[in-house]
Image: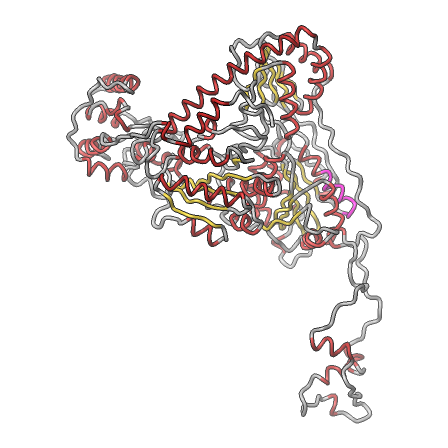
Amino acid sequence: MQKTPKDTKPKLSRREFLGTGAAAGAASLLPAGQVSSAAESTAAERPVLAAPSAAQMARETGAARPPAKIDRIVHKPVSDLMVQVLRDLQIEFVASNPGSSFEGLQESIINYGETPNVMPEFISALHEESAVDMAHGYARCEGKPICALIQGTIGLQHAAMAIYQAFCGQAPVIILVGRDDKHFLQAHTADDVAAIVRPYTKWDAHPKTPAETLSAIQEAYRQSVTPPCGPVVVVLDSEIQKEDAGTLAVPEFVPPAIAGISQRQAESIAASLLKARNPRLHVGRLRTPEGIKLAVRLAEEVGASVDTRATSGPMSFPQRHPLAGPGDNDDYDFELGLERPATHVSIVGPGLRTLDDRDITGVNLGVVRTPRTAQHKPAGQNDIVADAEASLSLLIDAVHRQRTASNAQVVRSRTQRYANANHEARVALVEEAVEAARAGWEASPISLARIYAELWPLIRELDWCLASPSIFSGRHHVNLWNHDKPYSYLGSHPASALGYGLGASAGAALAARDRNRIVLNIQGDGDFNYTPGAMWTAAHHKLPMLTIMHNNRAWHMELMYLQYTAGVRGRGTDRAHIGTTFRDPYIDYAKLAAGYGVQGEGPISDPELLGPALARGVAAVQNGEPYLIDVLTQPR
Amino acid sequence: MNSRKIHALVTLALGMATIMPGNAQVQFGPITGDAENGKKLYYEQGCYGCHGYQGIGRKNLANDVSGIMFSEEVFLIYLRARADLNPMLPSQDMPHYPESSLSDEQAKDIYAYIRTFKDTPPPVDEIPSLQTILDDVANEKGEGSK
């Protein structure tokens, strides 16, 4: 380890100090009439009292400035290089709640480089769970990671729930954990900090040198974006962050090599698609927006109808693409799954492994470890364990090679037929959804379908992202809205655990802020109250996040569970509200928002007031300000 | 009444539910309960949780669309026949209401209140947002990827 340069000038002992003119300055500070005991000594010993020097006067008046360069300053801390690594990886944000084991890295983020605090920008979170949820929400939008920067044992335990959620959601998230082994609070540190979350992270490292640290961050990126994607942890020793880097340089980044299907498999699948009378694609969640473009190209090249998951989560096929839908008949003779099971061939990436199956050798040695090949349980006989997105270019190339004039004509013909049939099917679905939404239109409290319906005319021309889970608010967007972007709907809580929606929406809004996009957060009240501080983050960083409270004043599912159990026991349901509802007092979310600096209004229970409020909210977020509308709703 | 008869009646009621919507010929039974007290009980017993505050929710009751509302007798039989034996999994199904927790009189009061629910939303062409949604899908022929 290289030592921080130190002042090599001999220092004065206290005795020597008192015996020199250095004491004169001290004496000169004494009020007139007071004489120090030293000054009462003999005249020979008495120091010469002189007028203060210019430097002393400058210090006295507060005008002193530190010299431009002194030896005691670390000019090139390793943490600067860590930031450079993140910058090279295009990490846009580091979301963090400040701690006392990563001030070295934090200082570099906010001060290093010609444009400090950009790529990455330090995002202030009020809770580590929020910070990780933000990284999770961002990852779902963009298909790539940002970082959460976490304080030792205590911050990591706060973050644990959100990490678990990201693990269940296979989201690429990089968690940097500060560690200070000489910490004044030993409870904040541990030999193996990452052990706290190892059961539900994909990979972790605790590098022991500056060079290892830079490599570990790069490897963390590769691990997080390589299927199975997931959260990864790098433990950063405080001392390493602060060391002088000397001649150390950022190592060259080697992008991950993500395995797709083989050439032979690609040729075989392409032949089947072109030969089929009625081919069908089942498109699940791909890794990145690029994967969606490739899936669209493949569908168009072979004229296949497509079953999409765009209304269930991010990164799937556009919902209203002409080929999206059942096609003109369901007698499919070749079905290909892309990250989805299918009758004939499925290309599905590996799943994340549990701790029991993880390679934990070398955990404490600081080495960069590569997990063993993940095991995947085949869903069918023709299941191929490979990343679908990485396979698509090969498939498209194979289709090009095998295409003839005659099957090109067949493809054109069925594409038109499918487009017409899909359009008819879509119109029928929307008409049904509209009729369902009409029920209870004038009800008060306000129906959830009306919230979704009234939003559509306001957002249909905008670039929008529905970031909050909709499972508890009726999923009315599914057929009332058009999901045509990779991030149109980010999906449900992967671990079915509350406390996720607000942080994830703030993360989606981080992605949206500089992309002229707005984020919609139809926010359950139970979920909101875990980490409401994310509202302040939205205000502080001017995030375009419109929060519409689905305020049913309850943890409603649990209320129904309790009602059912009381019924089974014959005890009546009239006390089931105990512990499942927000009564006495009701929570005022508009006031909460105001307290965090977010403009808001409500509670609104008159349905006629809803539309104008939503219009004000959309206008606010278009201007780059978060906004909250508290809506008293029907329970479901 | 034995369980077989209960099952038969509930089946009848549920069968009625499938033929009721839009069938103005079917006459529902008389109302003897106190709707005002029923309103209070509807809230206290948490009926709004699934059926909404005005009978529109996960399971709609407004506009006499549900077979379980065919008569007070059917309603009572339905309430008294819900119990499973100590289910291990949590459930969001309709709870069981034995007479020990909800008397016949109270149940009839709730019945009377539910029968007051009338949902009369405007037609779609008078709701601009819903009309926009219909127009958008009607006018598109598939926009492709963006």
Residue A586 position (above or below residue A24) = above
**A334 relative to A552 in the view: left or right:** right
**Which secondary structure is most common in the magenta stretch?**
helix
**A426 relative to A450 in the view: left or right:** right
Q: Position of residue B58 (x, y in %)?
A: 36, 29
Which quarter of the rendering shows the C terminus of chain A?
A: top left
Q: Is residue A618 magenta?
A: no
Q: Nearer the viewer, residue A303 or A12?
A: A303
Q: Quadrant of residue B103?
A: top left
Residue positioned 80% across, 39% down in the render: A252
Q: Position of residue A150 (x, y in %)?
A: 62, 48
The furthest residue to the top? A406
Q: How is the image coloured?
A: secondary structure
Q: Quadrant of residue A276?
A: top right
Q: Nearer the viewer, residue B135 or A471?
A: B135
Residue numbers of the magenta segment:
A209-219
**A82 relative to A482 in the view: left or right:** right
Q: Is residue A213 magenta?
A: yes
Q: How many marks?
A: 0
